[in-house]
Amino acid sequence: MLEPEKLDWIKVYQAGNQGMNFIKPGKVRLMTTERKDIQVARLGNELFAYETHCPHNGFSLKDVVPSEDCIVTCPLHRYSYKLQTGAEMSGEGFRLEIYPIQLREDGMYVGFPKKRRLFGIF
């Protein structure tokens, strides 16, 4: 995972420190950001943000609820990914993009890799 200073932090929820309560335990919510759509899942007292499509073939992970052991499984070909790392469990080398979450006083933020600029101008 990238260091926090190498990320653009985008606010995805307004509720400040109450951000944990916007999603019930064991549930997932689709969120639209200025960068891309992401899924946010709550497992116990942890929040996980991740991409909405399986990296194996692009099948939608919308509304796929992760297991209690923090595994999200694509319903099409059954590829499974660890939400802590994004690693695919069979060792095939696919990786689900995972995004860090920060709960701050003024809202919930998700960290996306900073956009690279061509020659520092684009």
Image: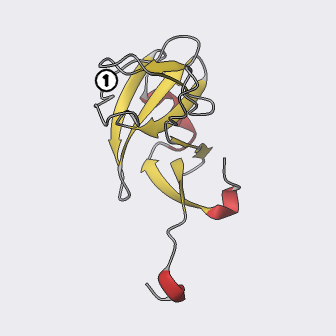
Q: Is residue 119 visible?
A: yes
Image height of 77 relative to 48, above or below: above
Type of residue at label 1?
Answer: Asp
In the picture, measured across the screen, residue 108 lies left or right of residue 2, that is left
The front one of 88 and 98 is: 88
For the point 52% across and 49% down, the residue is: 109
Q: Residue 94: percent from the left, percent from the top?
A: 50, 35
Disc 1 crowd rating (10 Å Cα; few below 14, some 14-19, many 20+) is some
Q: Residue 42: percent from the left, percent from the top?
A: 50, 24
For the point 43% across and 84% down, the residue is: 122
Q: Secondary structure at mark 1?
A: loop
Q: Residue 79: percent from the left, percent from the top?
A: 43, 21
Q: How many marks?
A: 1
| Residue receiving disc 1 | 63
Image height of 105 relative to 78, above or below: below
Q: Is residue 107 visible?
A: no
The front one of 92 and 31 is: 92
Q: Residue 21: percent from the left, percent from the top?
A: 48, 27
For the point 46% across and 27% down, the residue is: 41
In the picture, measured across the screen, residue 97 lies left or right of residue 37, that is right
